[in-house]
Image: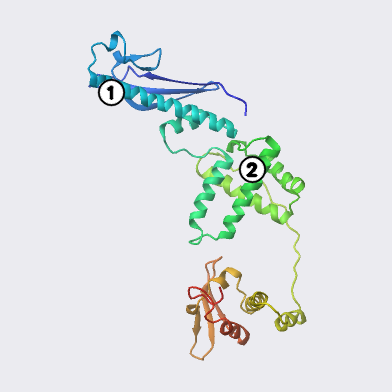
């Protein structure tokens, strides 16, 4: 990123002298002509302030009649201003190196105030960090890994297209989306169904930016994903019988086949299979056994009758699951 015109200074607000005779010390950051002011939270008597240095006067004629205790207070104030100045310089350099900086970003780094992410990768990282905390509670690890992959693709796109590590959220528009799609399909040669998932994840981040008021408008408004040609494949009865009766030499292959067969008979996906326990098996008054569970993906209540083959599979792996699980 091209270096900006960056200046910072400290001054006192002489219009707000308090009963103690002190007035607030203010900070001012100027970046490419844009000014951002803030309160340092410090106070000083006007007669002990040097506007030329932007610091308290600790030596010289003005400080001759100052008590040792007061001098220590003034020295401490100057040290705090030095710290703030260094924090501003560090924030400026860090964000310039990352490809995006504003006066507000520098101010928030100095004051320690929380700031809303103003760049795409920063917001994506914040989202992923929060998502990771919810994995195993109300989010699944597979979805988390998908977000990480999209973040990786975006970082690669930014370096390829702009030579940058990050980009302002304000740069998200229809052209950015089209260019990202082109990059995924032609440069990375990712299949349509896969890169559609990247665009869906990016759209969620864009909506998050709108929600936190970083963006005024959803850049995906009017955008439509390209439909993925569907290829419905299914097993014939003969093919299913071959799988059902096949002989496997390893436990892993046999276990995989049995769970596939169990899924065919019950209609359950892998996540629901992995969470099945003895408590999900209910015996009705007529002696029939049923699975009662809440589907993980939809949250709907599901009752499935267990036929002979699924019951035999349950019996086969009884006691092998961990933490009371039936199969895993």
Q: Is residue 153 left or right of residue 21?
A: right
Residue 48 location (% of width, % of height): 30, 15
How has the structure been colored for display?
rainbow
At x 74% / y 44%, what residue is drawn? Answer: 182
Whether residue 23 is visible, yes or no, is no
In this orientation, does residue 52 appear?
yes
Point out residue 131 in the picture as x, y percentages from the top left corner: 52, 53
Identify which residue, 163 or 280, lies in the foreground.
163
Residue 71 x/y as whole percent: 27, 19
Splitting the image into 4 quarters, where does residue 262 fall? bottom right
Q: CA distance from mark 2 to mark 1?
A: 48 Å
> Which residue sits furthest top?
61
Task: Give the residue number, with chain letter if any, for mark 1.
Answer: 73
Q: Is residue 204 above or below residue 140?
A: above
Task: Tell me if residue 25 comes above or below residue 317 in the rendering.
Answer: above
Q: Which mark is residue 155?
A: 2
- Classify residue 167 as left or right of residue 113: right
Q: Is residue 137 above or below residue 40?
A: below
Image position of 79 (left or right of 158): left
Other-residue count near label 1 (Cα within 10 Å), few / some / many at <14 / 14–19 / ≥20 = some
- For the C terminus, the image quarter is bottom right
């Amino acid at each position: 990123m091209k270096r900006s015109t960056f200046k910072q200074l400290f001054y006192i607000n002489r219009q707000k002298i308090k009963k103690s005779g002190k007035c607030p010390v203010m900070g001012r950051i100027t970046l490419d002509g844009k000014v951002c002011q803030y309160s340092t939270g410090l106070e000083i008597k006007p007669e002990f302030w040097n506007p030329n240095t932007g610091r308290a006067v600790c030596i010289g004629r003005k400080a001759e009649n100052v008590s040792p205790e007061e001098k220590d207070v003034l020295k401490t104030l100057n040290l705090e201003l030095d710290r703030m100045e260094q924090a501003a310089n560090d924030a400026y350099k860090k964000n310039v190196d990352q490809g995006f900086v504003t006066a507000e970003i520098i101010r928030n780094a100095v004051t320690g105030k929380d700031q809303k992410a103003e760049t795409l990768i920063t917001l994506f990282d914040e989202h992923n960090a929060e998502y990771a905390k919810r994995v195993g509670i109300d989010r699944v690890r597979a979805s988390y890994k998908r977000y990480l992959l999209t973040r990786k693709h975006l970082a690669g796109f930014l370096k390829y297209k702009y030579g940058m590590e990050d980009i302002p959220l304000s740069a998200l528009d229809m052209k950015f989306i089209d260019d990202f799609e082109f990059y995924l399909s032609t440069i990375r040669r990712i299949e349509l169904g896969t890169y559609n998932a990247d665009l869906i994840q990016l759209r969620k981040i864009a909506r998050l930016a709108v929600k936190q008021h970083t963006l005024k408008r959803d850049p995906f408004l009017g955008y439509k994903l390209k439909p993925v040609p569907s290829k419905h494949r299914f097993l014939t009865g003969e093919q299913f019988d071959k799988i059902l009766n096949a002989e496997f030499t390893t436990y892993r292959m046999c276990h995989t086949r049995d769970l596939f067969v169990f899924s065919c008979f019950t209609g359950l996906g892998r996540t629901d299979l992995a969470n099945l326990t003895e408590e999900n098996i209910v015996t009705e008054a007529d002696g029939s056994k049923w699975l009662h569970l809440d589907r993980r993906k939809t949250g709907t209540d599901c009752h499935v009758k267990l036929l002979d083959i699924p019951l035999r599979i349950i019996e086969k792996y009884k006691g092998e699951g961990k933490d009371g699980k039936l199969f895993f």
